[in-house]
Image: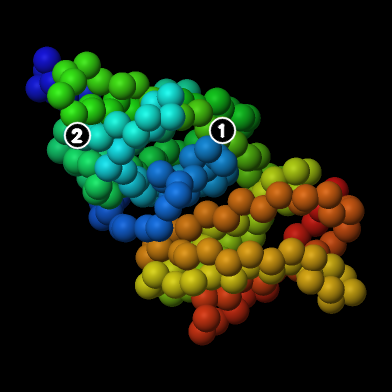
C-alpha cells in the first residue's frame, strides 16, 4: 500500500522545463516551511520568470487532538491552484522525506498578463505515522498573487551576495512581502522608520542561505511614506515603502 502510494504520488511536471536544482537547508522552527506558506509566497510578476524554493522541515512527531504521534515519513502529493503553466519539483526522487529531516520544493512559472490575479492554492501533504499504513493527509492553503508588470517596479535579486528586493505590493494595504538573499546563514535585523526617523517596528529572524521572504503587516501604522532597513550583520540595505 505504501509503496504504491509513493509511486503514484511521484509526478514530474513539464519534462522539457529546465528546473532549478534545490538543496535542503536546515532552519530553526517552529514553522514547517521557509518561506512560511501559511503567509503566502512572494508575488509573481507578469512577463517575468518566477522561481522560488520552499524549504521543508519534517518533524519527528505530529500532534493529533493534542496527542503527539511519531512520524515515519511525509511527502508532497500535490500543489493545486497554481497559475497555468506553473510547475514544481522536489529534491526527493519520490517526493517523500523521512522524519526529522529537511527537504525542498522548487516552484517555477512564466506568468503572462492573462494570469494577473490572486490564486488560492492548496499543498497536500501525506504523513505516515508509526505502525499505520494509511497516511494522515494535511492540507496547507496559501495565496499566490500575480501582479501586473505595468504597475510594479521589477527588480532582480542578486545571487551570491546580500541583496534585498523592493517590497510588493507597494503601496501597502495590509501585508507586503520582502525577499532577500543571503550568501550564508545569518541573523537578520528588520526595522521600519517613519519620515521623522522614529523606529516604528523591529524584528529579528534567522535567515537561511539563499532566498528568504519576510512578511510585514502594517499593524495599524497610518498612511504615509516609510523606510525599511534590513541588515545581515555586515551590510545594511535601506528602501522606501508606501502605506496607503
Q: Is residue 177 above or below residue 141?
A: below
User: From the viewer's perspective, is the residue at label 1 or at label 2 nearer?
Assistant: 2
Q: Position of residue 128 (x, y in %)?
A: 23, 27
Q: Name the residue located 31 percent from the left edge and 21 percent from the top edge.
A: 136
Q: 12 or 23: nearer the eye?
A: 23
What label does residue 72 carry, if any?
2
| SS category of the residue bearing label 2 | strand
Q: Position of residue 103 (x, y in %)?
A: 27, 47
How far apart, in angstroms, are the residues tagged by discs 1 and 2? 29 Å
Left or right of 211 in this view: 142: right
Q: Position of residue 65 (x, y in %)?
A: 43, 24
| SS category of the residue bearing label 1 | strand
Can residue 85 be seen here? The reply is: no
Left or right of 70 in this view: 83: right
Q: How is the image coloured?
A: rainbow
Left or right of 160 in this view: 111: right
User: Where, quadrant-wise, is the N terminus in this rendering?
Assistant: top left
Can residue 184 be seen here? The reply is: yes
Q: Using a 10 Å C-alpha cutoff, classify the residue at mark 2 as few (fewer than 14 neighbours), some (14 to 19) or many (20 or more).
A: some
Q: Name the residue located 58 percent from the left edge and 75 percent from the top edge.
A: 231
Q: Name the residue located 88 percent from the left edge and 58 percent from the top edge.
A: 224
Contact check, label 1 and label 2, Cβ < 8 Å: no
Q: Name the residue located 60 percent from the left edge and 79 percent from the top edge.
A: 236
What label does residue 112 carry, if any?
none
Q: Quadrant of residue 173?
A: top right
Q: Is residue 229 above or below residue 39?
A: below
What label does residue 143 carry, if any?
1
Q: Is residue 94 above or below residue 189?
A: above
Q: Quadrant of residue 209?
A: bottom left
Amino acid at each position: 500500500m505504501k509503496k504504491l502510494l509513493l509511486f503514484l504520488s511521484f509526478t514530474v511536471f513539464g519534462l522539457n522545463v529546465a528546473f532549478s536544482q534545490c538543496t535542503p537547508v536546515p532552519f530553526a522552527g517552529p514553522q514547517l516551511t521557509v518561506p512560511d506558506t501559511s503567509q503566502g509566497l512572494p508575488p509573481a510578476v507578469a512577463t517575468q520568470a518566477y522561481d522560488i524554493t520552499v524549504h521543508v522541515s519534517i518533524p519527528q512527531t505530529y500532534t493529533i487532538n493534542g496527542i503527539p504521534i511519531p512520524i515515519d515519513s511525509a511527502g508532497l502529493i500535490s500543489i493545486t491552484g497554481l497559475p497555468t503553466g506553473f510547475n514544481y519539483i522536489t529534491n526527493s526522487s519520490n517526493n517523500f522525506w523521512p522524519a526529522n529531516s529537511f527537504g525542498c520544493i522548487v516552484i517555477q512559472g512564466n506568468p503572462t498578463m492573462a494570469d494577473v490575479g490572486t490564486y488560492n492554492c492548496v499543498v497536500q501533504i501525506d504523513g505516515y505515522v508509526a505502525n499505520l499504513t494509511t497516511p494522515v493527509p494535511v492540507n496547507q492553503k496559501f495565496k499566490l498573487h500575480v501582479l501586473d508588470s505595468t504597475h510594479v517596479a521589477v527588480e532582480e535579486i542578486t545571487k551570491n551576495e546580500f541583496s534585498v528586493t523592493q517590497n510588493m505590493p507597494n503601496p501597502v494595504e495590509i501585508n507586503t512581502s520582502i525577499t532577500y538573499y543571503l550568501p550564508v546563514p545569518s541573523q537578520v535585523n528588520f526595522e521600519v522608520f517613519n519620515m521623522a526617523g522614529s523606529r516604528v517596528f523591529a524584528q529579528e529572524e534567522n535567515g537561511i542561505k539563499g532566498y528568504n521572504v519576510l512578511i510585514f503587516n502594517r499593524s495599524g501604522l497610518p498612511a504615509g511614506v516609510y523606510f525599511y532597513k534590513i541588515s545581515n550583520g555586515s551590510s545594511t540595505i535601506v528602501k522606501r515603502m508606501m502605506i496607503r
